[in-house]
Image (cartoon, helix red, strand yellow):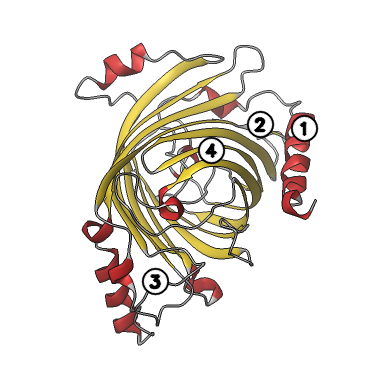
């Protein structure tokens, strides 16, 4: 029973999501004219004074205003059906990023038995994001597609990036990067659908919303299915789908509606996500070449809490993530912090 104990909070959250879905969609859900948004994410386990597992991630994303679909994207948008909701708007975007993973022992120049291998992932993405509402309750819906293409191995530049940061800050230099996963191009095709349920009426000073989501990932880097949700409560909640981590899709990238007044906002949030994993290249190793690997867990859980504050143009937030062990030889959960900064145009 201990191996699935982390599922209980997720199950309770799912029940609360279903039981709380009594409110109609908020008035601002009818606004489908979001401006463009630039989002920067920085994630690191330095926030909890560790340097292992998923140890660093950085991502820069830009989403155009609603209706901006160049280079045949409008045809692709029309070709993809919108099951279960009425599509009102769509837009495109792009992102670049880098992630790195290390074992706990950074001083060894040899592979560390029983620990995850060194790995880096440098990537770029094309994003299609669509918004609408359900026909019955007018619940806001956001649907996201992302094609992520990149490279593992030395081409990811993870070794140079981590050694440079450690050198500048006077930390111990990682000595085992020559054992990292080998150079290999890869891709991930991601899909996510998120809903936004209003619990407190938006005309009240204090607002509360639940944002459940489901997600699937397929490709040479990862094959997984995920389900989760987030509760946020505060003042001046934006007409978006919240904030999460680099690994998410729709909720890290919002954008204010042209019809929504520019105002300050602040809110707290808590959430959870469960993941069923068929493949994780950063644990399973290279797909086409022999490499180091570890025995991964098929079920992984994330729990997060944070705070977000915004002014007329910028918005900034911090989310702290607790992640259950990802492989059998990992005896403790992992933690990292995620900083998110948005410029709302």
Answer whether labels 1 and 3 touch (C-beta < 8 Å): no
Q: Position of residue 252 (x, y in %)?
A: 46, 45
Query: Which residue lies most toward the front here?
Result: 290
Q: Position of residue 342 (x, y in %)?
A: 40, 51
Point out the tag, 1 or 3, that comes first from the N-terminus: 1
* Of the pair 153 and 165, the residue shown nearer to us: 153
**Direction from residue 218 to residue 150 in the image, left or right:** left
Question: Which residue is at a point 59% across and 26% down the rendered structure image?
Answer: 27
* Callout 2 crowding tier (Cα within 10 Å): few <14, some 14–19, many ≥20: many
Answer whether labels 2 and 3 touch (C-beta < 8 Å): no
Q: Nearer the viewer, mark 1 or mark 3?
A: 3
Q: Secondary structure at mark 4?
A: loop
Question: Which residue is at a point 45% across and 70% down the rendered structure image?
Answer: 103
Residue of label 1 = 20
Point out the tag, 1 or 2, that comes first from the N-terminus: 1
Q: Position of residue 207 (x, y in %)?
A: 68, 42
Point out the tag, 2 or 3, that comes first from the N-terminus: 3
Answer whether labels 1 and 2 touch (C-beta < 8 Å): yes
* Callout 3 crowding tier (Cα within 10 Å): few <14, some 14–19, many ≥20: some
- Determine which quarter of the picture holds residue 236: top right
Residue of label 2 = 197
* Separation of marks 4 and 2 at Cα, in angstroms: 10 Å
Residue of label 3 = 111
Q: Is residue 64 visible?
A: no
Q: Position of residue 156 (x, y in %)?
A: 26, 57
Answer whether labels 4 and 2 touch (C-beta < 8 Å): no
* Separation of marks 1 and 2 at Cα, in angstroms: 8 Å
């Amino acid at each position: 029973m201990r191996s699935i104990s982390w599922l209980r909070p997720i199950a309770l959250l799912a029940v609360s999501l279903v039981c709380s879905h009594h409110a109609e969609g908020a008035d601002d859900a009818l606004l489908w004219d979001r401006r463009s948004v630039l989002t920067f994410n920085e994630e690191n386990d330095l926030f909890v004074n560790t340097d292992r597992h998923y140890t660093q991630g950085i991502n820069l994303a830009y989403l155009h205003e609603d209706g901006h679909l160049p280079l045949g994207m409008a045809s692709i948008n029309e070709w993809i059906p919108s099951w279960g909701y009425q599509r009102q708007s769509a837009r495109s975007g792009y992102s670049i990023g880098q992630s790195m993973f290390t074992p706990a022992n950074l001083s060894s120049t040899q592979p560390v038995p029983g620990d995850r291998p060194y790995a880096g992932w440098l990537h770029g993405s094309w994003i299609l994001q669509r918004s609408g509402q359900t026909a019955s309750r007018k619940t806001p819906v956001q649907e996201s597609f992302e094609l992520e293409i990149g490279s593992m191995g030395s081409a990811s530049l993870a070794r140079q990036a981590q050694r440079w940061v450690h050198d500048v800050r006077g930390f111990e230099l990682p000595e085992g990067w020559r054992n990292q996963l080998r150079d290999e191009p890869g891709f991930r095709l991601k899909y996510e659908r998120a809903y936004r349920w209003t619990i407190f009426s938006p005309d009240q000073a204090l607002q509360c919303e639940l944002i459940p989501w489901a997600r699937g990932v397929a490709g040479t880097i990862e094959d997984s299915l995920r389900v989760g949700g987030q509760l946020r409560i505060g003042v001046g909640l934006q007409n978006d789908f919240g904030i999460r981590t680099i690994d998410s899709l729709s909720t890290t990238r919002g954008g204010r509606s042209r019809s929504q007044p520019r105002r300050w906002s602040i809110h707290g949030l808590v959430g959870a996500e469960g993941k069923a994993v068929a493949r994780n290249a950063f644990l399973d190793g290279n797909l086409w070449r022999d490499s180091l690997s570890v025995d991964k867990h098929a079920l992984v859980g994330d729990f997060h809490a944070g705070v977000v504050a915004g002014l007329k143009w910028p918005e900034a937030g911090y989310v702290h993530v607790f992640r259950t062990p990802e492989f059998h030889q990992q005896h403790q959960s992992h933690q990292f912090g995620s900083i998110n900064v948005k410029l709302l145009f």
